[in-house]
Image (cartoon, rainbow, N blue to C red):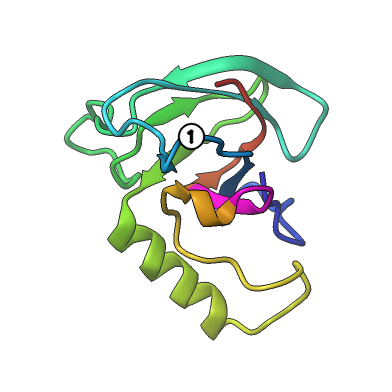
Amino acid sequence: IHRPPSASNANTMVLFILCIKAELDGVETLSLMKNNNLCFSVRNPLSDETRDKIVFDPSETLEQDDGDREPPHHFALKWDGNKKTSTLIALDEEGSKSALKKLKKKGKKGGGGEIDVPRDVTFDDSGEYVPVFAMECRGLEPYAFHP
């Protein structure tokens, strides 16, 4: 999981990109299935508290109350002692493009090389890290992916 620098502010929406590396032998493409649950472990960016193996469906947002000020999201939790709900938003292709464009506009402050829009892994990518999934998180950090 690509973790951007200065992602420790619990009120800031932070973009996380899941990159995978695979040797494709006899397989043309590898992709995440769009309508299947994904499993990640997440941590509180302000403490050592974690939640292991949270599961969410990136194709479905959670139901929200009428007065809810949070944008539609795919996963939510409240850390012990926090008043605000921490959220995770799974980004589709357009959402990923928009988030990456905003990130580039803010300037290139560390974080390593350029990150592309998530896509399928192809035979030509064998042995290279490829972005396959993007998510915006507020108040939580994904640190492990469980395929």
Q: Is residue 114 above or below residue 123?
A: below
Look at the image and tell me in which quarter the N terminus lies. top right
Q: Is residue 141 left or right of residue 55?
A: right
Determine the image quadrant of residue 49: top right
Q: Residue at x 58, y 81 (%)?
A: 106
Q: Nearer the viewer, residue 58 or 66?
A: 58
Which residues lie in the magenta part?
Answer: 126-132
Q: Is residue 49 visible?
A: yes
Left or right: residue 47 versus residue 21 is right
Name the amino acid type tagged 1: Gly
Q: In the figure, 69 relative to 37: above or below? A: below
Q: Is residue 143 left or right of residue 64?
A: right
**In the foreground, 5 or 118:** 118
The residue sitting at 48% across, 34% down in the picture is 26
Residue 9 point in image, percent of width and height: 69, 53
Quadrant of image for the C terminus: top right
What secondary structure is marked by label 1? loop
Q: Which residue is mark 1?
A: 26
Indicate whether residue 61 is drawn in magenta: no
Q: What is the x, y in percent for residue 45?
A: 73, 40
